[in-house]
Image: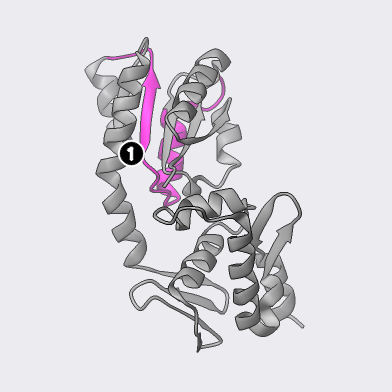
Amino acid sequence: MSKYILIVDDDVSIAEILEFNLKSEGYEVETAVSAEEALEKDLNIFDLILLDVMMGGMSGFKMAEKIREEGVLTPIIFLTAKDTENDMLTGFSVGGDDYIAKPFSIKEVSARVKAVLKRTEKEIKAEGEENKLIRDNFVFDFNMKELTIDEKEVPLTKTEFELLTLLARHPEKMLSRKNIINKLWTDTPYVTERTVDVHITRIRKKLGIYASVISNKIGYGYRFDVEELHNILNQ
């Protein structure tokens, strides 16, 4: 499965170098030139954040502190020109998972990225499976692997449950078919974008009057439309 990485750095040249090299290693990458821009994204969809500390406006430390208070568990590797012990301790105290001092080598960044992803992957998976996700009258139970709507179970297959869960976890994000494939069909070769469409069609049929909660935009992908769900409930 291709991991999804967000780079937050106001030095465009550094961000571009990191983006190029990480993409060449098979990662999906997005960039933001400020903490403020990064905070406009759904940070839960990323597997890792490379976060510069010294930026104009909100600092990387402040951003990390803010998102941890909001419950975002995405691993963070700080990038900074400061490498004193106090700075490192500050980074870890606000929720950082690792700390790389500038100037750094691409090989070092690559090694740290792989190490953090490997170390946190099982922890994040366990955290997600121990909880329920509730979207109004939609209740996803990760222990029982089932969806209930209006307290009635919806008979979803494993893949259908995982696909709908993926969308429901990120209701403000339009997920592309490619992104969905990378998340759900990691061990299955030759899966096409049409495969995603077929599963969406099946899920919509099972949702009945709530079918339109899964919205799509031609050329972009699918999303879990909370506003549409509210409209249906208020009819």
State yes or no: residue 184 in magenta. no
Q: Looking at this view, is 222 or 159 the one in front? A: 159
Residue found farthest to the left: 85
Image-based side of 101 in relation to 184, left or right: left
State yes or no: residue 62 in magenta. yes
Magenta range is 56-83
Up-down: is 34 above or below 155?
A: above
Tell me residue 222's x, y (percent). 65, 58
Disc 1 marks which amino acid? Gly
Counting other residues with Cα less than 10 Å from the Cα at mark 1, is it few (<14), some (14-19), or many (20 or more)?
A: many
Query: What residue sits 70% from the left and 66% below the top?
Result: 227
Residue found farthest to the top: 103
Give the residue at mark 1.
Answer: 95
Q: Looking at this view, is 47 or 71 the one in front? A: 47
Query: What residue sits 43% from the left and 49% below the top?
Result: 72
Tell me residue 37's x, y (percent). 61, 33
Image-based side of 3 in relation to 105, left or right: right
Up-down: is 81 above or below 233?
A: above
Tell me residue 11's x, y (percent). 54, 15
Q: Secondary structure at mark 1?
A: loop
Q: Quadrant of residue 212?
A: bottom right
